[in-house]
Amino acid sequence: MTPKTAVSLATLVLAAALAGCGTTVPLNDVPVESRQTTPATGGTAAGGAGSKGTTAQSQVATVDLARGASETTPAARTIYFDFDSFIIKDDYKAVVEGHAKALAATRGKRLVVEGHTDERGGSEYNLALGQKRAEAVTRTLVLLGAADNQVEAVSFGKERPAVQGSDEAAWAKNRRAELKDR
Amino acid sequence: MWPRRRFLVALGSSAALPAAAQFRVEISGVGATQLPVVVASFRNADRAPLAIADVVRADLQRSGLFKATDALNALDERSVISAAEWRGRGADALVAGSVSKLADGRWDVRFKLWDTVKGEELLGQSKVVLEADLRLAAHRIADEVQQMLTGERGVNATRIAYVLRTGRRFTLHVTDADGEGGQVALASPEPIISPAWSPDGRELAYVSFESQKAVVWVQDVLSGERRMLANFRGTNSAPAFSPDGRELALTLSREGGSQLYVMPRAGGTPRRLTSSSAIDTEAAWSPDGRAIYFVSDRGGGPQVYRVAAGGGAAERVTFNGAYNISPTVSPDGRLLAYITRQGNGYRLTTLELASGTVTTLTDTQDDESPSFAPNGRLLVYATRQAGRDVLMTTTLDGKIKTRLLTSGADMREPAWGPFSR
């Protein structure tokens, strides 16, 4: 590379850096006859405006969460719901009463009620439907004697089915609220 | 091929068109006129980990605006181009370039774009990139070619986030807009839903069930640093960044039910936006940041409503069908895309807000999670085809669809990232 070309190249690069354009340089100003590889000149940003020197703009860092323990909920702690319904059927009234009494007896006890839906429909809307089911249970628990701060209603929507399948039998097993000790 | 080329040549020679606009062909329905462009394999590409010209060709083709072919000649940015020869071979534009590895391991990517109808050079550039950014460099070349030839900004350098479930493992992926170059942002034993990009493309908000309830997190894409944004009592979900990036709308059950709130991006006290005894969720900001579209079942079944970002009365926006969810607004604010239930199927649909015209875009039955490309020309969505989960893009008229990704695993929740990368 001739001194003159080197100077014009350096000037161009400097101008580009100052202008904040990163390293995209108009080709007609770069001497295309020079085919030797040149080491990087200090101060030129790699990969475009605003990037750190050695971090690719395309980089996506991976966060890996530790495995959690899984548990299946026993039947006495699961309440099933009809399609599109948030009403606790008579079959389950005794279950809810029992838990309410246990909570009333021991004020230190806490319970979380997890609401679920079947797989049909959108994730966020189903999350809200599951929340509605969970709150139907916590409302009843409080009515029957539990303190408000002893219970929390949360929802998994359709994200944690108990049973896989796309028929009414599977759907019925997924429309549920599960009561878990905290 | 022949009829189109004659059409383009005829257009080019029309006296009414100013010379500079010769290539800005009016594309009324995408696919009506595809500009033929030749993209030659880049010199030294065989020594690079990536065939840059292949990526550029595929990008141009996928936009629906071009017919992109190979040169079958060895060409680079220094080549002397005979416009007449290439015109005779059916090309209206030609791209050629080279890649060279520098001593420090970075790559010098150079290319030129020629207009073979006018016989002039339109563009010439040199980029120096890290090897990990070679694919990004190719996407940027495709974007610049598209911009120069059609006046339309391409989305090839943008990214799409989506969630994959394999067995009991959930992963949040970030992939290029062509479905390639996928990387994992989050791996978890519990579900992840509702990824949402910040307007500057630097952060992803999402809902994670890692603590056995729905909590909204915000994660820096480049560094992986994450913070809990909303962990109030009950369920925290459906995060959506405001267009100015300063706030997020979300759905909280902290006061009972599912209601919309707005919070500062850095976290803090949420301001309640809706006050109904129904379910209000799935906030989607209008591009001017002044209104929020959302889903409410206050009228019985879920429908899309709109409320001023500062709060107030909500007005209903969807009137066709009994179940309408997952609204998203086009970047020009004119179109609402959403999912409607028809019979047993869930279909991607658009509503032209000014006229009320409703259009179903697909004939699949399990569509979900539509998201506009930042240039407003395409929608990405998840659906099922032949028993497999797929991520699809479609033009707004539903005519050109591309399958981005196929998976035997459960693949959902695509969110198209912004231009800013």
Image (cartoon, helix red, strand yellow):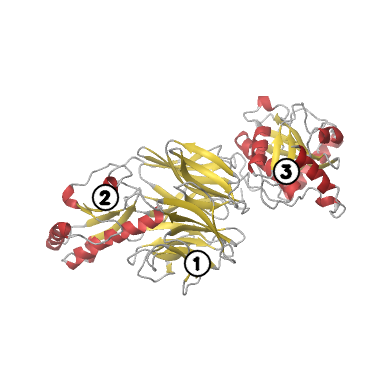
Between discs 1 and 3, the one toward the N terminus: 3
Chain letter belonging to callout 1: B
What type is the residue that disc 1 sits on? Val
Protein chain holding label 2: A
Callout 3: SS: helix
Q: Amino acid at mark 3?
A: Val
Tell me whether marks 2 and 1 sit on the same chain: no
Q: Which residue is mark 3?
A: B145
Disc 1 packing (10 Å; few <14; some 14–19; many ≥20) = some
Q: Is residue A31 above or below residue B144?
A: above
Q: Nearer the viewer, residue B161 or B69?
A: B69
Closer-to-camera residue (A114/B301)? B301
Q: Is residue A149 left or right of residue B223?
A: left
Does mark 3 fall on the same chain as mark 1? Answer: yes
Rendered residue at 60%/39% (across/down): A54
Question: Given the image, on which type of amino acid does mark 2 rest?
Answer: Ala
Q: How far apart are the alpha carbons under marks 2 and 3?
A: 54 Å
Does residue B205 show up?
no
Label 2 residue SS: helix
Q: Residues within 10 Å of mark 2 (few under 14, many from 20)?
A: some
- Element at label 1: loop
Disc 2/disc 1 C-alpha distance (Å):
33 Å
In the image, B159 versus B356, the foreground residue is B356
- The chain holding disc 3 is B
Write down the residue under mark 1: B317
Residue B93: horizontal and vertical position, in percent?
78, 39
Nearer the observer, disc 1 or disc 3?
1
Which residue is the site of mark 2? A172
x, y percentage for residue B74?
77, 26
The image position of residue B399, as x and y in percent, is 60, 47
Looking at the rendered image, the disc whose residue lies closer to the viewer, 2 or 3, is 2
